[in-house]
Image (cartoon, rainbow, N blue to C red):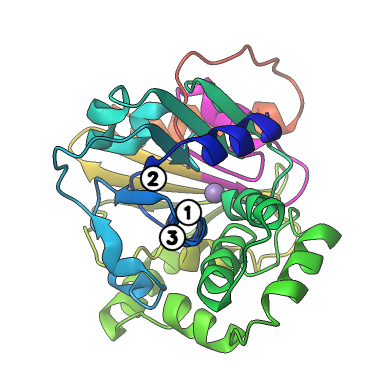
């Protein structure tokens, strides 16, 4: 599949590049690195996202090329990055079929192979790692592309702390950092963005944590999940992960009446993609999510009891029908 991607990029002229809604470092870093690569090899490129770019990512090179309004541009190829399913592109999905060829480049294990060409590698730490491989193939790299790729890998490996931080990841990063990247500046841009109210809100969530020590599960219930510029989900998980001997971390966020977003993280043993799939979602083995329509109490009850049985290895899980990313 890698060869097919190289071939279609080489022979085509005009590209649409997009990624998943709820933009984060890997989606944006991969898109913008792809933009840099395609421009270097003299292609025409449009980058479209349904969501607006969160302010914390405004430091990324090329970020101003991202468009949120779909114009009537024609393109030969749609490159869909970091998306487990085409519906994860939001309203960009409506124009994907205009392309002669949809290329799906992703690392979610729950990918639905929606493209004409599907390069899906669940072993890759990030979509950015896959774009790095494309850059190597085309022998293209510069400071801007390197910063985009670094940011993508940094985000999806949880600042190089998750189980997907392989020796290969470190080798890539050692190469990318040669292009005068300042890791502390990337870190500060992404992670030092909380306001005092955010921290107090996080404090209230931490205060109400629930723990099942026997089943190694820790979770939090958030009765009103606010819309915010900066997503504090990862901040909360990073604090939860300070807990000793806990394997699975879950957030229950009420985003609307009877609409609960559930995020899962696991340390190294439990496959939370399977857990999320059981409830109609999906993602990665170590990070996944789903949205369930029911009351907060009912969702907490059914998810926690499922996770308890699952971590005890007492349930077998059939393949889910719907998938969505984390
Ligand atoms: Mn990703």
| Residue 123 figure quarter | top right
The earlier-in-sequence mark between 2 and 1 is 2
Q: Point out residue 243 in the picture as x, y percentages from the top left corner.
A: 66, 65
Whether residue 53 can be seen here: no
Would you name the residue on which mark 3 appears? 32
Q: Is residue 325 left or right of residue 107?
A: left
The residue tagged with tag 2: helix, strand or loop? strand
Q: Residue at x 78, y 43 (%)?
A: 269
Point out which mark residue 234 bears. none
Image quadrant in which the N terminus is located: top right
Q: Point out residue 178 in the picture as x, y percentages from the top left corner.
A: 70, 82
- Whether the residues at callouts 2 and 1 have beta carbons within 8 Å, the answer is yes
Would you name the residue on which mark 2 appears? 17
Q: Residue at x 34, y 27 (%)?
A: 99
At label 1, counting other C-alpha atoms closer than 10 Å, the crowd grade (few under 14, some 14-19, many 20 or more) is many
Q: Looking at the image, is mark 2 or mark 1 nearer the viewer?
A: 1
The earlier-in-sequence mark between 3 and 1 is 3
Would you name the residue on which mark 1 appears? 38
Spatial separation of the CA atoms under disc 2 and disc 1:
10 Å
| Residue 257 figure quarter | top left
The residue tagged with tag 3: helix, strand or loop? helix
Q: Looking at the image, is mark 3 or mark 1 nearer the viewer?
A: 1
Q: What segment carries the magenta color?
A: 264-289
């Amino acid at each position: 599949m890698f060869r097919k991607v190289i071939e279609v990029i080489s022979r085509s002229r005009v590209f649409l590049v997009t990624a998943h809604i709820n933009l984060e470092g890997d989606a944006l870093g991969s898109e913008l690195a792809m933009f840099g690569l395609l421009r270097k090899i003299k292609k025409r490129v449009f980058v479209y996202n349904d969501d607006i770019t969160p302010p914390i990512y405004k430091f990324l090179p090329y970020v101003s090329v991202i468009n949120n309004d779909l114009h009537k541009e024609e393109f030969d190829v749609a490159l869909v990055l970091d998306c487990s399913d085409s519906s994860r592109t939001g309203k960009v999905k409506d124009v994907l079929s205009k392309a002669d060829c949809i290329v799906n480049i992703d690392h979610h294990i729950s990918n639905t192979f929606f493209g004409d060409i599907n390069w899906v590698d669940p072993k890759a730490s990030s979509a950015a790692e896959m774009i790095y491989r494309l850059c190597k193939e085309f022998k293209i790299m510069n400071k801007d592309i390197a910063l985009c790729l670094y940011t993508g890998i940094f985000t999806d490996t949880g600042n190089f702390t998750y189980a997907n931080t392989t020796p290969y990841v470190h080798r890539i990063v050692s190469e990318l950092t040669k292009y005068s990247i300042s890791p502390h500046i990337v870190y500060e841009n992404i992670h030092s963005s909380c306001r005092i109210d955010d921290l107090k809100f996080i404090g209230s969530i931490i205060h109400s944590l629930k723990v099942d020590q026997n089943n190694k599960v820790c979770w939090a219930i958030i009765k009103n999940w606010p819309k915010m510029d900066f997503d504090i989900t990862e901040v909360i998980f990073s604090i939860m992960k300070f807990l000793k001997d806990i394997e699975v971390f879950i957030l229950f966020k009420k985003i609307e009446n009877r609409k609960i977003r559930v995020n899962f993280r696991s340390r190294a043993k439990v496959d939370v993609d399977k857990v999320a799939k059981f409830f109609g979602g999906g993602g990665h083995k170590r990070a996944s999510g789903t949205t369930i329509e029911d009351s907060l109490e009912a969702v907490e009850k059914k998810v926690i009891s499922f996770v308890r049985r699952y971590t005890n290895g007492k349930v077998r899980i059939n393949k889910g029908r719907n998938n969505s990313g984390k």
